Image (cartoon, coloured by chain):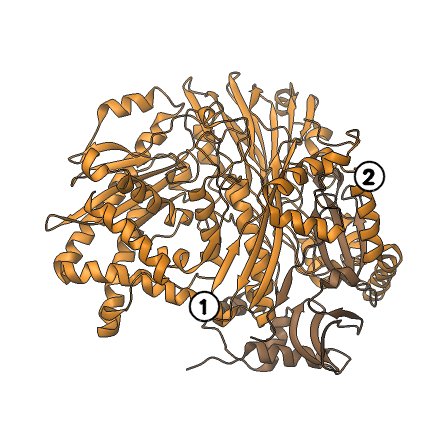
Chain colours: A brown, B orange
Amino acid sequence: MAISYPKDLLRDLLEGNLSPERIWEIQHAPKDSDRCDKVVSLEQERVPWSERIIVCLQEHLYIVEKRGERIIKCSCGHEFGDYRTNWKESALVYERNPQDGEVYFHTRAADPDFMVLREFYCPGCGSQLEVEAVPPGYPFIFSFLPDLDS
Amino acid sequence: MGKLKEAVIAKEKSLKERSCYEDALLFKEQDPIQFEVLYTKLVHSVLNAREVAALVSASPVVREMGECVFGLYTAEGDAICLSVGLMLHIHTMSRMIKWMLMNDYEEKVGIREGDYFFNNDPYIGGTHSPDQLIVTPIFCEGELVGWAGGVTHVPETGAVEPGGLPASATSRFHEGLILPCVRIAENEEIKKDLEVFVSRNVRTPEWWLLDNRAKIAGCRMIRDEVKKLVAEYGLDYYAATSHEYIEDTMRATKTKAKSVLFPGRYRAVAISGVGRRLLIHVPLEMTVGRDGQLSCDFEGLSSPGAHAQNNTLPATEGVFMCAAIQHLFYDSRYNSGSLYAMKLNIPEGTVCNPPNIFYATGLLSPSIATGIVWNDCLSRAYYAKGYREEVFAPNVVTVGMHCGGIDQYGRMFGAFNMEASSCGTGARGVLDGLDTAYALWNPEADMGDAEVWEQILPIVWLGRGIQPDSGGFGKFRGGNGIESLYFVANTNQAEMGSFGGRLPIFTSAGIMGAYPGSRTYRNIVQDTDLKARIADRLPLPHYEGEMPDKPEIVRLLNGKAELMVGRYAARPVKEYDVYYQTNGSGGGFGDPIERDPQLVRQDVANKVTLLSTVERVYGVALDSTTLEVDLEKTGALRAAIRQSRLKRGIPAKQYIAQERERLLSGDLTKVARDLYDDILKISPKFAGEFREFWDLPEGYLPSDVSDQKTPGGSV
């Protein structure tokens, strides 16, 4: 019999409210084939805007349908533009010296000659959406381009 | 041409032309229960072999830490089933068998019942010289019907440094004893002359020689069990089903990928490197097709070089597929089918597929990095499909301590203590990573007992624990790694060092807003007053302590202290020298200021997060005495962090324009310049994308515009 979980349980899963033991059980069971639709529906309930979510791209970011276009939108409502362009090119960027003492202890941080931390923020809400740990001069990583017509 | 060589060629042709291993699953369809019963019996045989072999071995690495694996193979060398353990060898043993067949061992060497072939040449099979393989043919009714094989990690190989993983090696010829597909036993008898050869060429021959017996015992158990099963089920049935199991896995692989991964293109990058002089680029472009076809393209890998971090094709394939099985195909059969179902491109002439056998291959950092970028890509594919419990932030490139010399009993010794098997895992999409629990290359690993090592090696642990705050900060944090503090005891004739990716870089990326895990390092204090402190019952260092920038060994000991970043070759040590080693931690998941404050409180109470971190990184207001969370102040702290981000962040287009100017003026550090010079030359695809992204002129190379005065890259 196909497995399907109630939305309340999936909400708890998404919000980190399930015990490791319950998560273990979910992991070890066959996958629920309606998960994607249910998660999209749950996320739709959480965001304060009404455009239809097509896919949950990553934490805070969704591809939504808006006036016939497919754009990337933050949970706060900020819009990043066409999903086929890397959203990072429309974000705020801060290049952090890993040894600045604000995040890591000096001994545990990368040497900035070798690697920098590139923090990407949503211009709307200041959420930290991604941190790239890359050598200086590395192009932005385009992490995910979904095949939306599949 | 030998009959089996013909079979290998025919199978490869068939896979290439028809993308399947068998056309149909006739026996599975005919009687699926019998099909599964036989498979279960075969799996039992490899599991039993592993358990028994661990008891024959003398090495704690195998006995306690689980560094061994056994498998069953078809006559042409494809994996049918594998035990748990050092699973990256699922395909490396396969490559060894195929290599022997393709090099005419049937006709020119001879393959007979009771033969045992040994290999630790990583260009043939295996990953590096300490990973040592033994296979034996299985004959039924006079016909070779398959192979049984086993691998153990032997922690000493007679290399230029002790412990089998010489960080200072610059070619294969520094890596100790390498025996490529040598018959070490015939008619069930181990060759004495070969044992003499080994015993005079490695520092601790007992481990090598008893591990050989362990593998022979395991192989023989599998072989005898298969013979019984062939007698029970019939040779025709066994021969046909052993191939169907592989085809069945190929089909299951595609079905699994299609059902749990969102179709699309994914990209990730990991960086490894060599000391303080060289960065290594490991990029992945993963494509999930609508039909579940998975393609993994490593175009853009760095060139190989005169260092120990080149990895052979079998090693890269093995480590990558080990990660693939753990994180995606964990519920299907462990055999060659999953590899054959995927399209892998590991370009020839790169650091993960060197052009010839000259290059040193001891340290597996680049191939481990292929698993790290896989974690990143796969996590995003799971996330988009809603399976957040499967999200698994990248793991770390593991490191560890090795030592050798004359031990406390006056014998020569060499060892690697394998604590690297206890790194922190990456964070999950719905909970924290595990502390001191995991290494990508062996999901069954264990950190082992310090007391056992203390009987064998001239070292004594002053402390062993969870390194607080070493996991990547995030909404869910990465698992913290293990930290160990040892002192040298009862010898003044020893050397000690550390292998692995000990660059001043992060190796376990955070994802979706989280930070990477801390970099790894080691500290050493020599000529200490430890002996006197012990005699005077004064406080001793046990851990790094609450001030990582001023660790306990610096605060509590007098002596010559050195923070060893980027230096790792073994160095002479003597009694009461003290050595501190970290082994790596996982990346985090999600924005750290979204972490549940109660989780932060709990971590502080459990001493896995330092009090000095909570406000700075998590924006949590915690009473330092009662550990009560002040939610109102926490809200204000987090709002302030958001505001400071909005203030300091600059629009990406402005950032890109600034960076472009830097690149055009040659304002790059030497290591970054060398990295780009190399990959822009070796990969036209990466070069095109690099120049397009930064809007650089055709033919741009950093070294062409560099003033050669920029800092960085000192050896």
B384 in relation to B585, above or below: below
Dividing the picture into quadrants, the one containing residue A88 is: bottom right
Q: As rendered, which of A143 and A36 lies closer to the eye? A: A143
Dividing the picture into quadrants, the one containing residue B381 is: bottom right
Q: Dot 1, crowdedness within 10 Å: few (<14), some or many (≥20)?
A: some
Residue B713, percent across and down? 71, 31
Taking the spot 72% from the left edge, 48% from the top edge, the residue there is B610
Residue A46, percent across and down? 72, 78
- Mark yes or no: residue B195 visible: yes
Give the structural element (helix, strand or loop) at label 2.
helix
Q: As rendered, which of B652 and B537 lies closer to the eye? A: B652
Q: Quadrant of the C terminus of chain A?
A: bottom right
Q: Quadrant of the N terminus of chain A?
A: bottom left
For this orientation, the residue located farthest to the left is B141
A96 in relation to B15, above or below: above
Give the structural element (helix, strand or loop) at label 1.
helix
Q: Dot 2, crowdedness within 10 Å: few (<14), some or many (≥20)?
A: some
Q: Which residue is mark 1?
A: B256
- Sooner in the amino-acid sequence: mark 1 or mark 2: 1
Q: As rendered, which of B291 and B464 lies closer to the eye? A: B291
Tell me the subunit letter for badge 1. B
Which numbered disc covers residue B665? 2
Residue B356, percent across and down? 45, 33
Residue A125, percent across and down? 82, 67
B493 in relation to A145, above or below: above
The amino acid sitting under disc 2 is: Ser
